[in-house]
Amino acid sequence: SPVNDNGFSELLKQHREGTNILDVTMPGITPKVEDYYVCTSVPVPTGENYIVQFEPLASGDMAHHMLMFGCEQPAENRKSWECGQTCRGKPNILFAWAKNAPPTNLPEDVGFKIGGSSNVRHIVLQIHYKNPTKEPDASGVRLHYTPERQKNIAGIALLLSTQISIPPHQPETISDISCQFKSSTPIYPFGFRTHAHSLGKVITGYQFNGTYHLIGKGNPQWPQAFYPVKDKIKISNNDILLGRCVFDSTHKDTYTSIGPTHNDEMCNFYMMYYTDANGGQPFYECFGNWRPDMFKNGGFPSQESLTA
Ligand code: IYT
Ligand code: CU
Ligand code: CU
């Protein structure tokens, strides 16, 4: 790696001045089967803190992908458990890492609030191991945090389809998501993540504020990390948020609907955003298609939304 004037590598330089470190890593996991999902959890540090950087600590190429959640309570109290369920109650996704995808860094003056007045009391890390391994694995994520109040808090907006029915042998089935954004405090998306299962072909997210603006477009078969939002986008009260998933069921003989398994599908578009720490909210949910008209009447860039 490149070396600067002080002889330190660029990697070391990335550590932000005056921050603390919390490593959330697996306690030595040896997956014995294919597609093994494991969770581990740690309580958050005392008081109110802000995560200002996530640093993946993936040893070798054992971990296929990692997701980190903020929870009030973990699903289980053991050090690690085989997990479908990550949190007891509602999980809040904080970070996603996937092999071969560059991690998205939080912008300056932005932090995820944990502890204190937030409802995050535990951090849960979920790792997907695709293959069995011989050596125990200790992959995880290093959190850089500070008690210093940040100007902006980070948050996650989740757009998801509540109903999907994909007929067999169709090259193109569309599922749309839309909501009117209601908040006096605007949000500024800087990262996006798409999620579908094996039939997902393209997922797009848009803002409408008089005209349509692409927030992100991805192929859910690519590593499902957070990718940077290219344009500067501000989402204000009454703007419309839109998501579209395109599925290819050419090689499937049965109908497909929403569910957790490989034979089911999902349609998710996540935005990681920042918003003013005074008045801004750390979550925004858009579940369902409340403004189907926004996809129909001219204007909507339908061609753009069909190819990755
Ligand atoms: C039914 C569905 O779309 N489930 C998604 C999104 C989802 C995530 C969370 C729904 C709810 C949540 O609280 I967090 I309600 C889903 O399960 N996505 C997976 C992970 O669970 C996060 C993914 O990889 O995006
Ligand atoms: Cu994976
Ligand atoms: Cu899923």
Image (cartoon, rainbow, N blue to C red):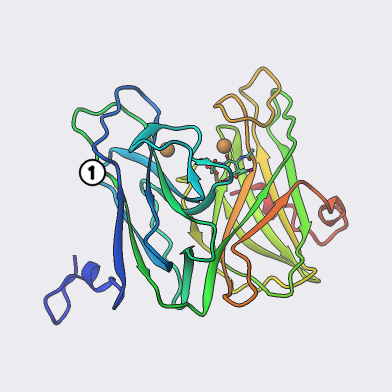
Instruction: Choose between 22 and 66: the one closer to the eye.
Output: 22
Residue at the far left: name it: 7
Expressed as whole percent of the image width and height from the top left, the position of residue 184 reads 74, 75
Q: Is residue 68 above or below residue 184?
A: above
Point 69% across, 60% down: residue: 206
- The quarter of the rendered structure image containing the N terminus is bottom left
Expressed as whole percent of the image width and height from the top left, the position of residue 245 reads 67, 44
Point 69% across, 70% down: residue: 235
When asked about the image quadrant of residue 294, the answer is bottom right
Expressed as whole percent of the image width and height from the top left, the position of residue 76 reads 44, 36
Residue named by callout 1: 60
Point 24% across, 67% down: residue: 11
Instruction: Choose between 227 and 179: the one closer to the eye.
Output: 179
Expressed as whole percent of the image width and height from the top left, the position of residue 306 reads 68, 47
Query: How many residues crowd around disc 1 within 10 Å: few (fewer than 14), some, or many (20 or more)?
Result: few
Q: Is residue 54 left or right of residue 23?
A: right
Tell which quarter ligand 2 is in: top left
Instruction: Choose between 63 and 5: the one closer to the eye.
Output: 63
Is residue 206 at least partly visible in the picture? yes
Q: Is residue 122 above or below residue 214?
A: above
Q: Is residue 270 left or right of residue 75?
A: right
Point 77% across, 56% down: residue: 179
The amino acid type of the residue labelled 1 equals Gly
Q: Is residue 158 left or right of residue 289?
A: left
> How many numbered badges does the structure rendering display?
1
Q: Is residue 2 left or right of residue 146?
A: left
When asked about the image quadrant of residue 119, the answer is bottom right
Q: Is residue 233 above or below residue 131?
A: below
Is residue 96 at least partly visible in the picture? no
